[in-house]
Image (cartoon, coloured by chain):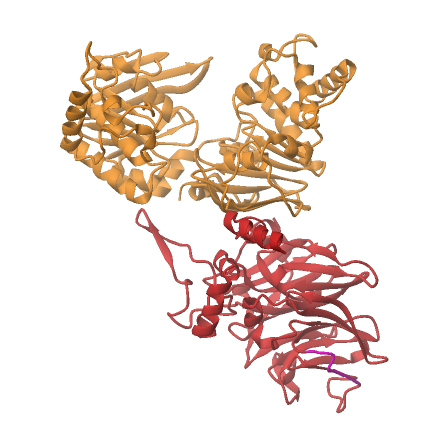
Chain colours: A red, B orange
Amino acid sequence: MRLGVFREFALGLLGRGEATIAVPSFDGALKPNQALERAEILAELEAPEDLATDGATLFVADGPRLARWEAQKLATVRVFDRPITALACLPGGAIAVALDGREVRVYATPEAAEPRATFAGADMRSVNALAPAGADALYATDGSATRDANDWVFDLMERGHSGRALRLDLKDQSVAVLASGLRYAFGVSASDDGALVSESWRHRLTALSPGGPAREALTHLPVYPSRLSAAAGGGWWLTAFTARTLLVEFVLREPAYRKRMMAEIEPQYWIAPRLSSGASFKEPMQGAHLKTMGVVKPWAPPRSYGLVVRLDAAARPLYSLHSRVDGVNHGVVAAVELGGWLYLIAKGPRRLLRLAIEGLATEFSV
Amino acid sequence: MSQIILSLEQATKLYAGVPAIEGVDFELREGEIHALVGENGAGKSTLTKVMAGVVALTSGVMKIDGAVAAPRTPLEARQLGVGMVFQENSLVPTMTVAQNLFLGQERFYNRLRGIYIAAQQFLQSLNFDVPPTAIVGGLGAAKKQMVEIARAVLNKAKVIIFDEPTASLTPEEKKYFFDLVRDLKQRGVSIVFISHALEEALLLADRISVLRDGRKVVTDDADKFDRARIVQAMVGRDLSNTLYGVRKATVRRAGERILTIQNLKMAPMVRNNSLSVFAGQITGVFGLVGAGRTETFKIVAGVLKRDFFHGGEILLRDKPVRYRVPAPAVKAGIAYVTEDRKLEGFFETFSIARNIYLGLLSKFPRGRALLSAREQADSGKRWSEQLKVRAIGQGGRVVELSGGNQQKVVIAKSLVQAPELIIFDEPTRGVDVGAIVEIHEHINRLADEGKAVVVISSYLPEVLALSDRILVTRQGKVVEEFSALEATEEKIMYAAIH
């Protein structure tokens, strides 16, 4: 124990190991562009959260409302009594919704009056992603055992590590914990031999296989990864709700500062990632710049960012679509592919967006 | 029009038959600030060294005050009124400011107190805030530069040449330096300064000359230039009939991420540098001198050390590594092919095979109990054939080879280690055209085989011809990334100097 404390002190002093304040660069397949800014805006919504598709129809979770995108507009399918925090279409036309992060319901059809299965309890607190796991099961990620789904920034600042990946069996309505102790699990999708899970605060994707050890599939991301969805032709679309910055990494390594900041400052003004920015001059850093030899150069790290990454079947990035600090379509939390289009939710400006997939690989592959 | 104080007519300087400058006409007016800009290797330094008597012209004429002058040493140039301020190089660090000022002017008996008083008075007359009794080694870069300038003025220089004067200065120090230069101008001193920072040239100079490939492209008043015109003049070469004439039509797709550098620091050269290198691709790294390219990759290869405190992180295949010496880096599969082959690349009196074998042995940090003459001969033969090293005989010493073949030996010495990440630092510097083609072919072959290849080069056409992706560095960090398909010389140069 004493040795551990000494080691931690030494590493902190030297700025090494855990105390290395370092963020990987956006390069290679993650090279920045402004592709998300040219996406078509389909709708401005109240509280968009997640997307799902059965291969023919796009479903949108907007606050407590479940809507369907048809005839170039959103049609309400049903309204729940609590906000939807995750959405997934299952084989056979069924649909699964997570309500307020604490309950998962599966309906045989989107319009069905009564749920076919309900999962509650099992310490669910912030279920934020759902994905089909074969014909009779679901994968789910429960971000945090201590914070609600909307309070993710608290979980980050408290350095939460209570996330879980779950498998919900529709037959016997049992819940199996695939992995626990995750640093904010936020996104899951089925893979060949199990599930691929996003672990936001560890900036990585982990491959989980039944009975086998967890394997790091993609690590050292310069962003906080979130939901995953299958891409046509193999691989996935990975969303990242914002970028990591040195400043936030530094704050995360300063417990005393963080504690005081959380106690004394309104959450919207914390030095913390945000889904959107520019609402107030009190926000830290976003507008800062340096003047060098008479030339104004922006230097402030982005407080908010928009990013979708196309991954191949080995979870390696192929290319990425960005909305940088001077853009608007930030806080991308969901992306699904349907009919040659990529549908997206930019939670920052609360928009449903659409982008033609054709030509993206050619334009943005490095 | 003010009087011409120094001029060069058809100035040519050959190094081993290769022109560093060729047919350059240059005029410096009295009391003007004249900026020299150009890429690395454009001939700026050679031109100024000719003026300062460091090197002599092969052909052409230099005139000072209208009279032909051919200074053979810096001392002779100084006597003619031409002084050069080097980048901190020409001061004696263990001596005081006053001793440095009067170095070379000692009399039979020097009274130290007298020197200090004279230096104090002189520095005050220049309004320089430098204590004459301070040891030079303990001064900051700006103060050292002040001492250099003071020494030039003390020597009654009519012309002062600055080689990259602001490279190591902070913004505040730069401002102070600019004021000093303007003050010197007021005193009637003519200034020549080399700068990679175009803003500085545009801000400070009365006239700007642009050099490219050893020739003067244009001289004009500074207010007739903007950045775009300077960049165009710096890089606007016609390559259609050369080795580099064909542009890439396709690029290799990135494979696994082999190397990740995160916020790497080695003051003052590497500042918060971050980049990734992928397998199966050639990553070109371009930057002007002082951009921290070589230093970054020398840290990766264990040749240099990053900052002890908060030096950033290097990940090899996503695992943190910190090499204090090159041997473990070699063992981990990193090969660094040096830019200075004569100093760091080989043992010149050893044979080709022995040099290559030494490369293989360095893969075993603890050495080998037994050495095999046959293994040495076999590996030497195999790699000589593979890289087409042309030698008079098998036992020929490396010193007897041409530059291109020496470079091939250095490359073979690294490749014999079967590395996964190969860093080529200026792979074709001082290499003949035929060997350049062969070296390029081999670098391409390595990438095709799935190796992660880094090519650091100051020659833009080479970067464009070889790279699949191009990273541009400036002031110690990567500032821009281009796919080879979208990159142009102008875009890269713009990123490198802005």
Residue at coordinates 43% horizontally, 33% vertically from top-left?
A: B289
Decide if residue A213 is on the left or right side of residue A295.
right
Residue at coordinates 68% horizontally, 55% vertically from top-left?
A: A218
Q: What is the quadrant of residue B361 in the picture? A: top right
Q: Where is residue B434 in the image (x, y as percent from the top left)?
A: 60, 20
Q: Position of residue B497 (x, y in %)?
A: 40, 41
Q: Where is residue A74 in the image (x, y as percent from the top left)?
A: 61, 82
- Nearer the observer, B470 or A286: A286
Residue farthest to the right? A171
In the image, is residue B25 above or below residue A330?
above
- Nearer the observer, A79 or B183: B183
Q: Is residue A355 visible?
A: yes
> Which quarter of the rendered picture does the N terminus of chain A lie within?
bottom right
- Nearer the observer, B240 or A133: A133
Decide if residue A101 is on the left or right side of residue A135.
left
Q: What is the quadrant of residue A96 in the picture? A: bottom right
Residue at coordinates 29% horizontally, 17% vertically from top-left?
A: B9
- Stretch in magenta: A117-124
In the image, is residue B345 above or below residue B236?
above
Q: Position of residue B291 (x, y in %)?
A: 45, 37
Q: Is residue A191 magenta?
A: no
In the image, is residue A297 above or below residue A239?
above
Residue farthest to the bottom? A113
Q: What is the quadrant of residue B142 in the picture? A: top left
Decide if residue B122 is on the left or right side of residue A272.
left
